[in-house]
Amino acid sequence: MTLVKEKKEKKDSNYKSWIDKAIRWKATPKDLRDPKTVIEFCKKNEINRREFYRECDKKEFKDKILDKSLNNVQNNTPNILHKLSQIAENGNLRAIEMYLKYILKLQDVKDNTFGTKDYKIEIIQVDGRK
């Protein structure tokens, strides 16, 4: 393998590495991020801030951040629901309402996703014809 090709492969590997780190970093809530700022992130990963922002503006980058964020939310949902159910069990009306709305919405999503919902077809008359 030539030296030029080795350098290109190393550069591509480093590029993918910092991009993956940036996606995880951007999907993390700001108060939990380490490093705390974009400047610190760029220094730590030895990248130019302009390059960081250029990548962040790309649609595919934003889509990956959204996917990672939704995955994080999905991982936290059971704990939050458990805490919400405990508050609801103590009689907090707002918590009861929120918990029941979530359960109903989840059931609706399940029904629409897995086709378990029974649908009624109603035949209507138009100008006296069916």
Image (cartoon, helix red, strand yellow):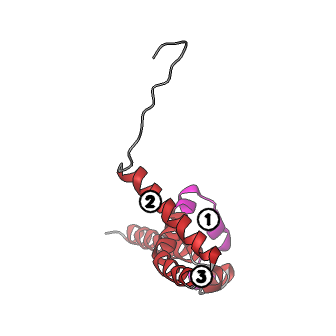
Disc 3 crowd rating (10 Å Cα; few below 14, some 14-19, many 20+) is few
Q: Nearer the viewer, residue 119 or 70?
A: 119
Dot 1: few (<14), some (14–19), or many (≥20) neighbours within 10 Å? some
In the image, what residue type sits under mark 1? Cys
Provide the residue span drawn in magenta: 43-63
The residue under label 2 is 107
- Kindly state the secondary structure of the residue where label 2 is placed: helix
Q: Say whether marks 1 and 3 touch (CB < 8 Å).
A: no
Question: Quick one: label 2 or label 1, which is nearer the N terminus?
Answer: 1
Q: Would you name the residue on which mark 1 appears?
A: 56
Q: Position of residue 64 (x, y in %)?
A: 51, 63
| Prevailing secondary structure of the magenta residues | helix
Question: Between tags 1 and 3, which lies in front?
Answer: 3
Q: Vertical placement of 9 versus 45: above or below?
A: above
Residue at coordinates 51% horizontally, 79% vertically from top-left?
85
Residue 63: image location, x then y, percent: 54, 59
Spot occupied by residue 106 in the image (x, y as percentages of width and height): 47, 62
Residue located beneath label 3 in the image: 91
In the rendered structure, which disc, 3 or 2, sits on the residue that comes first in sequence? 3
Nearer-the-camera pick, 45 or 82: 82
Q: Is residue 109 left or right of residue 40?
A: left
Real-space CA distance between mark 3 and mark 2, rounded to the nearest whole angstrom: 23 Å
Residue 19, image x and y in percent? 52, 70
- For the residue marked with disc 3, what is the amino acid? Gly
| Left or right: where 106 falls relative to 53 | left
User: Looking at the image, which residue is at 39% across and 67% down?
Assistant: 5
Q: In the rendered view of the protein, which quadrant contains the C terminus?
A: top left
Q: Would residue 6 be seen by someone viewing this image from the given angle?
A: yes
Foreground disc of the pair 2, 1 = 2
* Amino acid type at mark 2: Gln
Magenta span has 55?
yes
Q: Is residue 57 above or below residue 114?
A: below
